[in-house]
Every structure is written in C-alpha cells, then in structure tokens.
Amino acid sequence: MIIADQKPVAEIKGFIEGKKKVLIAGCGTCVTVCLAGGETEVKNVASALRIAFKNDGKDVEILEDTVERQCDDEFVEPLLARVKNEGFDAVVTLACGVGCNFLSTRIGPVQVFPGVNTSFLGSNEAQGDYLELCAGCGECILHLTGGICPMARCSKQIMNGPCGGTSDGKCEISQDIDCGWYLIVKRMQELDILGQYDEIQAARDWSKGTHGGPRRLTKETAAMAAEDDAAKES
C-alpha cells in the first residue's frame, strides 16, 4: 500500500490562511490503514485547525468529508459536487499524492492542498510500523532475487550484490537497517536457488522507471468494456 505521514497542523494552517471555507477530505484506503488520512485523522486535523484559527481570532469554517478512494472518478464525484455546491475556498486532502493530483485536475478553480507527505510503497509490519518493500521501478526482478527487492531494500540500489560496507547483516549507513542483499542471499539459500546469483543478467532497462515522464498503463480490454457499457446506455 501507499504509506504517507501527516503534515504538521501548523504547515497545513499556513496553506489555508486567508480562506473562509475549507473542506478537509480523507481517503478510506491506504492512508486510512497507515493512520495518516482516514476519517479519524480528518476529524483530528479539522478540530486542530478550528482551534488554531479560533485562537487567532479568525472565523474560518472547517468541514469534513471522507470518500472510499480519491484516485477514482466513481468515488470522488460526490466530493467534487459538494465542493462546487457548497462554495468551498479550498480543499485540504489527506489522501496520498495521487489523490491530491487527481482532485486538482478535476475540481475546477478551487485549490487543493496536500495534508500528508507521501513516503513509499510498503507493508504493515505491526500496528503503526510500516516498511518500504517496493520502489515502483517498472521492471520487477523479484523472480531473480528470492522475492526481495534490491531497489527498495538496498540503500544504494545496487543490482549485482552487496557492497563492501555490510556488516553482520546490517547496512553501513545504520545498524537499524538490514542489508538488502544479505536478506536476498539468505532467502535464496533458503529456497535452494543461490546458484541463480551467478547467472549473468542483461543490463537493466532504466527507461521503464521514472526517467521518461509520468508513466501510464492502459488495460485495453477494460477500456473496451467501458466503451461497450457506454454504448448500451446511450
């Protein structure tokens, strides 16, 4: 899932200084799970902002809303309609950066401000503990590395084995960080596939990453099905 961390209330307050009516918008998926932008966090941020503006002697109306997903037209349409119909000056979204982008391109002349910092793609290791496991690099090689990603787990993103700084399974930059390649080798040994490590691999195609502009993936069958449904409705 996408992991995010809430921005300080003071920073969010600075975004909306001068606004009179602001909607705090949450998202019911990833940021809810990582305790950054769900319904509870929306209530907390809205309450903190009301108190902060009241202490400043300013009359700012802060309202709340949370939708299932902010990255899907189906779920954001009611939110967009509310913003338009109720005359909001601004929206603070507690969704990830995708949600903030998505709303911004659909909401018209109302500015959308980010209420969280989007951090990484990761797992829920324990309550309140999240670990980056995927770098979203565009060319997954987990079949070569025992299911552990060197792009995400190696601090240097080395693709051909550990550097000389690893010690006792830890990365040289911190004893709190596992060496990604130590984990990979250990896992390949467990699977009895360590011999694959000696196989020569082709040079990585970095163009599939974030080096050629925003990436886009279109599922043609899904697009065709949507067109068929639209044709039937008309």
Image (tube, grey):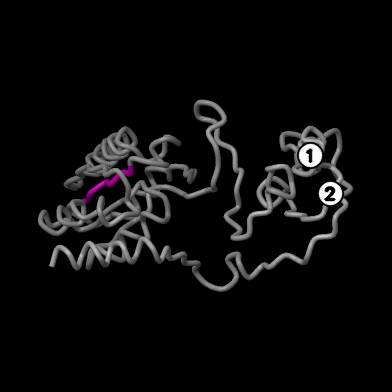
Q: Are marks 2 and 1 in contact (CB under 8 Å)?
A: yes
**Residue at point 19%, 68% (across, down):** 231
Q: Main secondary structure of the magenta part?
A: strand
In the rendered structure, find residue 159 and report the number of the disc placed on it: none
Q: Position of residue 227 (x, y in %)?
A: 27, 67
> Can you tell which quarter of the image residue 170 is in?
top right
Q: Residues in magenta?
A: 22-27
Q: Position of residue 75 (x, y in %)?
A: 25, 50
**Is residue 77 shown in magenta?**
no
* Image position of 97 (left or right of 154): left
**In front here: 16 or 64?**
64
Residue carrying label 1: 188
Q: Nearer the viewer, residue 155 or 135?
A: 135
Q: Position of residue 169 (x, y in %)?
A: 81, 35
Q: Say left or right for 41 vs 18.
A: right
Counting other residues with Cα less than 10 Å from the Cα at mark 1, is it few (<14), some (14-19), or many (20 or more)? many
Q: Which residue is mark 2?
A: 197
Q: Which residue is rendered at x = 25% and y = 39% of the image?
A: 55
Q: Amino acid at mark 1?
A: Met
Which element is circle 2 on?
Answer: helix
